[in-house]
Image (cartoon, rainbow, N blue to C red):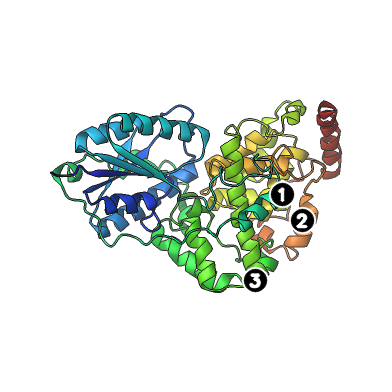
Amino acid sequence: MSVGPSIVWFRDDLRVADHPALTAAVERGAPVVCVYVLDEESPAIRPLGGAAKWWLHGSLEGLRDALDALGARLVLRRGAAGGVIRSLVEETGARAVFWNRRYGGPERELDASLKRELRDDGLEVQSFAANLLFEPWTIRTGQGTSFSVFTPFWRACTQAPEPRHPLPAPEAIDGGGTAATDAASDAIDDWELLPTHPDWAGGLREAWTPGTAAAHERLDEFADDGLGGYADGRDRPALDVTSRLSPRLRWGELSPFEVWHALRERRVRGEGVNRFRTELGWREFAWHVLYHSPELATRNWRAEFDAFPWPRLHPAALRAWEEGRTGVPLVDAGMRELWATGGMHNRVRMVVASFLTKNLLIDWRRGEQWFWDTLVDADAAANPFNWQWVAGSGADAAPYFRVFNPELQATKFDPDGAYVRRWVPEVGTDDYPEPIVDLKATRAAALDAYEQVKAARG
């Protein structure tokens, strides 16, 4: 008796190596239907921003090519994911569905509901750990609760069993069978993920090449040659010493297991590798916090910050920040880098976020929304988590009184002004505006506002 096809539902795991769901489907021994669903309709699923859509287009093309080389095709569908997957099951006669787990609240609810329904219909349905080194329910405090401070969290992770070794890509995928090969697929160009009128993505194309091939090339470069100066240079935005792996991990072109063991295999030692592993840990921590606080993008993690007296929004100040016209050179350089490339150096991200929330006294959610639309690596965990960290309202947050002075930060981390000159060439000329706020006065105003939070905390 023939065995019905297996469906592999790709999500933020756009790769063929170290893909447990794909491995399970191949090992099942039936034809495999590979599908990606662009879901902008399911309840509470957050639609992608513009820069993320640009990256998704390229990453899906890379996945399509990788699957083609193995004998499978990528089916593209658009709509509410639960209904799309159920329809694909009916069309193909599939008897098994596999996917890798997600950790956001709405995504977990959707996946759990679909898993129950399909199992009730007699299908085999399995989900797998693929995108975090440590799943959120496996790392707990001694009291059995989730961690709220990074250092003990990461200590617990490093004392846990070593992350598993990555799985190899399948040698071949059985994409045969009429139902599997004839499944209708959207054309990716019909999704209009790329900007056209106007085409604002020229800087993104210059800065990045999405796809698994480029991801592995970059990982090899960084693991082989990039860690020697990482510890000392990672805070210098003018230097090209960061890993540039964050969008690769965000879209799952690489798994964290591949990154972790790439360092292990090369027997890399020194402060650089320790610092980089800690950055992987920070990514893990953000996802763990989101798992336990699904409304991280819309609600203060620290409830006492609900008392913070955000003033009435001044749209002109917000627009000046978004466009890099604040008259504060390091802030403007970061915001222009973001608009041009879809990325921003991490040190500068902290500076521009501090300036928005503490010098302009604009709600962190406004900044989080702008980053969501303009970053190629914006994900549901790190983006709000990091914004709340800077604002002071999040887990393990910087003390509110820590205000990143952009002038001092520039002196320390861009001492010769190379980064600022690259992105703000008119700085120091009559064409460059005066600062829109006084840094010292606005810092004092921010600290005065914070007294209301302290009073609410009691």
Tell me if label 2 and label 1 are in contact, CB under 8 Å: yes
Q: Is residue 217 left or right of residue 285?
A: left
User: Disc 1 on helix, strand or loop?
Assistant: helix
Tell me the residue that label 1 is attached to: 351
User: Disc 3 on helix, strand or loop?
Assistant: loop
Rendered location of residue 285, percent (x, y):
62, 47
The relative height of residue 406 versus residue 9 in the rendered view (above or below) is below
Going by the numbered disc 2, the residue's amino acid type is Gln
Circle 1 packing at 10 Å, graded few (<14), some (14-19), many (20+), is many
Q: CA distance from mark 3 to mark 2?
A: 20 Å
Residue name at image x 59 percent, y 43 percent: 288
Q: Is residue 419 left or right of residue 341?
A: right
Circle 2 packing at 10 Å, graded few (<14), some (14-19), many (20+), is some
Circle 3 packing at 10 Å, graded few (<14), some (14-19), many (20+), is some
Tell me the residue that label 3 is attached to: 229
Q: Quadrant of residue 418?
A: bottom right
Rendered location of residue 399, percent (x, y):
79, 43
Going by the numbered disc 3, the residue's amino acid type is Gly
**Mark with earlier residue (2, 1):** 1
Q: Viewer-proximal residue, 105 or 245? A: 105
**Mark with earlier residue (3, 1):** 3
Q: Which mark is residue 409?
A: 2
